[in-house]
């Protein structure tokens, strides 16, 4: 039996806004599908990060982003996987429930070290 | 939820900022001086397309709760969305520089101090307004100050234009003598490029989402698009008419902003010069606000960052930093002594080249049920947007060679 609410992975989920409550975490930059022998494929993770979107433009772009990240990055790898089980809802946005994640590392670093030091920022 | 009046304020600031700005003032004044009423139709045609596109931007956002940048990425994927974004960022950078240049020229008209000296203070004021201001304050302040541009309409009426040829010029091209037809069409193309600016759509749709529009706002969205853009068009036509009355009989070909600044003097006497200076400064400031925010909005939305003009900058660090960097980088050409009028005309031409790429997604998004549900485009809307893309492609094709050979 096909599911009644067919969800088109690429059309409906990929590139959607990822949110946790009011906080925007980024976009659904990639989807990881696991192929299983004798069973239908399973969506295992949502992938997020600059390296993931860069990969979609080409390997050169991914390498470039990873090199930039090694030199200037504030997090280990600009790539993060969210297990599908953490997805709480899909409407306009993809709502996830995460305790710890590095997705706002840049936002927080810039807020603390750059923007926060400029007057009237808070 | 905001009242209808405040919603229309968003339309008027979109219009003042996006419509009557350095590009429109320059192109309308040039058109009037060289071809009298012969190019009013270009403003009317551009406005007609713009009304439809702005209405569509608002409708898309009100129904789908997506901004255009969000919708483009979601519908077409990152691999597509990144290219129009990059192209627009480059164009916005140059246009922002031109608008800040326009503010500086307005201040030069008022004070006599050279425009280059104003670049840093103007950039600082612009940045500060965005840094501490909320969308409401910025919208309303610019809308109210922008009403000063009615000075152009007053002047146009006071100059007693010939209404019948004026009306004829508004509905159909009035061809010039054959030897001027190259310049005629180049000016027509510049007017269209200056009228239909892509950043207006990003600004307007982000404003609609930030103000929380819903399906019940579709009526006021339509009114806003029509009233706001017609207001801008009226001002633009007024600039053209005043310029036609003042410069056309004398056979003056406008080459410098200082010449354009004289346009209001015959009608408004000693008030003409300062009102021109203030109007130019306010309009260009409005445009600079809009371009800075539109750029930051569309980058933040393409990458899914937190965005919003109403939050404190520290909570929207990447968003706030984007417009900050853009503003301060954009004044570099001005500081290096690039002529603002030249930068304006060059960036209007670039706008025209990017235009087809920017409005192509409208056809698909506004017919996609998953985004607009039952509020899809009707046949007229689809015709207008297809026509606009077609026209934009021609404009782009015409502009590139003309730009290479040095413009009209």
Image (spheres, coloured by chain):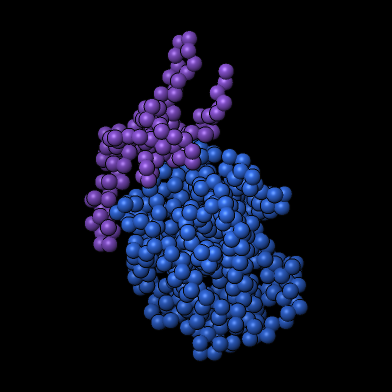
Chain colours: A purple, B blue
Which residue shows up at 41% across the image and 23% down it? A44
The one of B187 and A66 positioned closer to us in this rendering: A66
- Residue B66, above or below B174: above
- Residue A74: where, in percent of width, then height? 26, 40
Residue B181's quadrant in the figure? bottom right
Residue B78 visible somewhere in the drawing: no
Which residue shows up at 68% across the image and 76% down it? B36
Residue B134 visible somewhere in the drawing: yes
The one of A114 and B308 positioned closer to us in this rendering: B308
Which residue is at the far top? Answer: A38
The one of B168 and B16 positioned closer to us in this rendering: B16
- Residue B337: where, in percent of width, then height? 40, 67
Which residue is at the far bottom? Answer: B270
- Residue B177: where, in percent of width, then height? 74, 71
- Residue A37, above or below B331: above
Q: How many discs appear? A: 0
The one of B9 and B328 positioned closer to us in this rendering: B9
- Residue B309: where, in percent of width, then height? 40, 57
The quadrant the N terminus of chain A occupies is top right
Which residue shows up at 60% across the image and 79% down it? B153
Which residue shows up at 41% across the image and 43% down it? B304
The quadrant the C terminus of chain A occupies is bottom left
Is residue B243 shown left or right of residue B14?
A: right
């Amino acid at each position: 039996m096909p599911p009644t609410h067919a969800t088109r992975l690429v059309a409906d989920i990929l590139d959607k806004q990822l949110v946790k409550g009011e906080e925007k975490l980024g976009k659904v930059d990639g989807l990881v599908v696991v192929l299983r022998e004798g069973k239908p494929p399973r969506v295992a993770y949502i992938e997020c990060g600059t390296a993931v979107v860069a990969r979609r433009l080409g390997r050169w772009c991914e390498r470039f982003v990873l090199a930039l990240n090694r030199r200037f990055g504030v997090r280990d790898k600009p790539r993060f996987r969210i297990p599908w089980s953490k997805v709480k809802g899909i409407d306009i946005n993809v709502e996830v429930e995460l305790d710890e994640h590095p997705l706002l590392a840049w936002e927080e670093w810039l807020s603390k070290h750059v923007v926060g030091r400029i007057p009237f920022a808070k | 939820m905001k009242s209808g009046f405040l919603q229309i304020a968003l339309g008027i600031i979109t219009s003042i900022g996006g419509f009557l700005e350095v590009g429109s003032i320059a192109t309308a004044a040039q058109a009037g001086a060289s071809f009298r009423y012969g190019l009013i139709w270009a403003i009317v045609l551009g406005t007609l397309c713009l009304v439809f596109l702005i209405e569509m931007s608002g409708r898309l956002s009100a129904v789908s709760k997506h901004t255009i940048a969000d919708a483009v990425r979601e519908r077409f994927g990152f691999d597509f969305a990144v290219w129009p974004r990059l192209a627009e960022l480059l164009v916005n950078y140059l246009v922002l520089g031109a608008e800040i240049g326009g503010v500086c020229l307005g201040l030069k008209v008022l004070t006599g101090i050279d425009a280059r000296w104003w670049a840093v203070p103007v950039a600082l004021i612009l940045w500060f307004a965005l840094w501490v201001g909320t969308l409401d304050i910025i919208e309303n302040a610019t809308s109210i100050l922008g009403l000063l541009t009615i000075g152009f309409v007053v002047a146009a009426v006071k100059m007693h234009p010939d209404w019948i040829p004026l009306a004829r010029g508004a509905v159909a091209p009035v061809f010039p003598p054959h030897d001027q037809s190259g310049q005629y069409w180049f000016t027509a193309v510049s007017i269209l490029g200056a009228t239909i600016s892509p950043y207006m759509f990003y600004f307007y749709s982000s404003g609609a989402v930030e103000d929380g529009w819903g399906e019940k706002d579709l009526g006021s969205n339509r009114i806003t698009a029509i009233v706001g853009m017609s207001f801008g068009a009226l001002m633009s036509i007024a600039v053209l008419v005043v310029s036609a009355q003042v410069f056309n009989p004398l056979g003056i070909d406008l080459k410098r902003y200082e010449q354009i600044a004289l346009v209001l003097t015959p009608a408004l006497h000693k008030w003409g010069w300062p009102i021109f200076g203030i109007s130019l400064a306010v309009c260009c400031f409005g445009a600079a606000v809009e371009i800075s925010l539109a750029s930051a909005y569309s980058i933040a939305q393409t990458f899914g960052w937190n965005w919003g003009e109403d939050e404190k900058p520290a909570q929207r660090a990447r968003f706030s930093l984007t417009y900050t960097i853009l503003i301060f980088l954009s004044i570099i050409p001005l500081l290096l002594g690039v002529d603002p009028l030249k930068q304006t005309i060059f960036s209007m031409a670039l706008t025209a080249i990017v235009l087809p790429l920017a409005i192509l997604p409208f056809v698909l998004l506004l017919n996609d049920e998953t985004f607009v549900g039952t509020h899809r485009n009707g046949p007229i809307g689809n015709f207008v947007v297809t026509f606009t893309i077609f026209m934009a492609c021609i404009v782009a094709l015409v502009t590139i060679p003309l730009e290479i050979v040095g413009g009209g």
